């Protein structure tokens, strides 16, 4: 079965994660896909299990005579982003796509070349989209499908291989995919998350990341007698934000440039809150950004009184390059596998995080591989059947290379 055919099946499972549930997994719907994958793996003859927190673990024993080869693994996540509707996905196939603007069902949305300049390069392929009313779910069910396609190839016996581990995780989209991951149970020396964009991507640098919450406590009195007395919490919150560099925002940054991103704000005269994420690839600049926010809070407390502004910063993950670069051979193996598949490999910094970032600091060096998809987390998400074929072939090439070492 081709990888895209699996994708068409997997996206029918609604698996959005939730940032507010407080459970593991964050949504019970993820269990259904996890159990389906366990069923399929067992039908292939693979020992697979799903634990109570919705992690799927599977191991494919080495081809006889290759048992002493380095054990490697592949990981993808079950959940889809809560940023757009994810239930009732109706995947649409567009064979021999002409590379131009494409209406998404009857939603009124149009996949436009003006917005996505890479589209002409996909001319002649089979393009897969949603109908515009939901996201597609290729992030990361494309990765799941490609790993399952690899498992089918390995169990068919035509590809000599060392020990291979597979895992599917819940809640990656809300930053909790590695929370309960059992590295020892997974049983690999190195792994690759299959969770990137277009095929050929070999990524090993991600943001250092933190979340920040700002609480402003005001002093509310009648506005007619407020002279030198009132502290308007909403206005102080605006003042806090104005102390951050205006151009250090997602809209104005790319590549290795970091940012402050205001994700939520609410309040009135008495109390106001701001929520931020802080991102930077460089550890020193990342620390400087945290210090800048602390300095802004201190300045406002000096101006309006101690306790007016409370800043809480919680670090979320770190740049995995620190743990992966000492094992540069796993990057070169992936790049050569891409070349062997006829794809020119590329590397660019991940402007976000992956399970692999945290897993690398848990002792499992874990770069990220492209799946063939584009425009994740929204109704314009798309992927091609041919790109998925190439991504699956790259996984096979990696297995082949480790078996030959």
Image: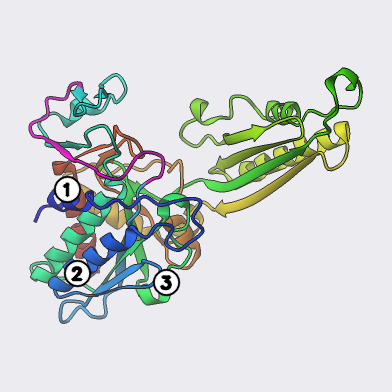
Query: Does residue 373 appear in the picture of this structure?
Result: yes
Q: In the rendered structure, are the residues bearing label 2 and label 3 in contact, judged by CB atoms less than 8 Å apart?
A: no
Position above or below: 20 against 347 = below
Q: Residue at x 68, y 29 (%)?
A: 241
Dot 3: what SS? helix
Q: Nearer the viewer, mark 2 or mark 3?
A: 2
Residue 181 image offset from top left, x and y in percent: 43, 68
- The picture places residue 64, in percent across and down from the top left corner, at 15, 81
The answer to whether residue 174 is left or right of residue 271 is left
The label number, if any, that marks residue 8 in the structure image: 1
Going by the image, does 88 lie left or right of 287?
Answer: left
Q: Quadrant of the N terminus?
A: bottom left
Q: Magenta span: helix, strand or loop, mainly?
A: loop
Q: Label 3 crowding class (10 Å Cα cut-off): few <14, some 14-19, many 20+?
A: some
- Sequence-earlier tag: 2 or 1: 1
The one of 43 and 395 positioned closer to us in this rendering: 43
Q: Which residue is mark 3?
A: 183
Q: For the magenta stretch, what is the residue range?
A: 81-101
**Residue 24 at x, y percent in the picture:** 45, 63
**Quadrant of residue 58 in the image?**
bottom left
Identify the residue at image location x=15%, y=48%. 4
Circle on res. 39: 2
**Quadrant occupied by the C terminus:** bottom left
Residue 392 point in image, percent of width and height: 19, 53
């Amino acid at each position: 079965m081709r990888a895209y055919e699996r994708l068409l099946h997997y996206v029918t499972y609604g698996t959005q994660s939730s940032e507010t549930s407080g459970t593991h997994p964050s949504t019970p719907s993820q269990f259904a896909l996890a159990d389906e994958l366990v069923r399929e793996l067992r039908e292939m003859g693979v020992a697979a299990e799903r634990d109570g927190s919705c992690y799927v673990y599977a191991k494919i024993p080495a081809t006889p005579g290759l048992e002493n080869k380095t054990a490697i693994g592949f990981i993808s996540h079950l959940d889809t982003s809560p940023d757009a509707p994810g239930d009732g996905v109706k995947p649409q196939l567009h064979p021999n796509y002409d590379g131009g603007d494409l209406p998404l069902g009857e939603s009124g949305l149009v996949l436009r070349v003006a917005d996505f300049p890479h589209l002409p390069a996909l001319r002649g392929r089979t393009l897969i989209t949603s109908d515009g009313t939901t996201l597609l779910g290729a992030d990361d069910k494309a990765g799941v499908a490609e790993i399952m396609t690899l498992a089918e190839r390995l169990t068919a016996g035509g590809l000599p291989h060392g020990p291979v581990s597979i895992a599917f995780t819940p809640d990656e989209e809300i930053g909790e995919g590695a929370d309960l991951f059992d590295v020892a149970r997974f049983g690999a020396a190195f792994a690759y998350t299959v969770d990137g964009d277009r095929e050929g991507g070999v990524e090993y640098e991600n943001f250092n990341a933190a979340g920040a919450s700002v609480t402003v406590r005001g002093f509310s009195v009648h506005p007619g007698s407020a002279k030198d007395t009132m502290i308007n919490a909403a206005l102080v919150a605006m003042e806090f934000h104005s102390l951050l560099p205006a151009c250090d925002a997602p809209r104005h940054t790319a590549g290795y440039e970091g940012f402050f991103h205001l994700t939520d704000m609410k309040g009135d005269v008495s109390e106001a809150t701001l929520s931020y994420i802080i991102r930077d690839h460089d550890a020193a600049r990342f620390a400087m950004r945290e210090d800048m926010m602390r300095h802004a809070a201190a300045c406002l407390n000096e101006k309006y009184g101690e306790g007016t502004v409370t800043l809480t910063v919680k670090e979320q993950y770190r740049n995995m390059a620190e743990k992966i670069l000492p094992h540069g051979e796993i990057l070169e193996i992936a790049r050569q596998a891409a070349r062997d598949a006829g794809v020119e490999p590329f590397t660019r910094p991940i402007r976000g995080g992956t399970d692999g970032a945290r897993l690398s600091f848990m002792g499992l060096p874990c770069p990220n591989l492209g799946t063939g998809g584009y425009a994740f987390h929204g109704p314009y998400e798309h992927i091609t059947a041919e790109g998925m074929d190439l991504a699956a072939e790259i996984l096979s090439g990696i297995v082949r290379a480790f078996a030959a070492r």
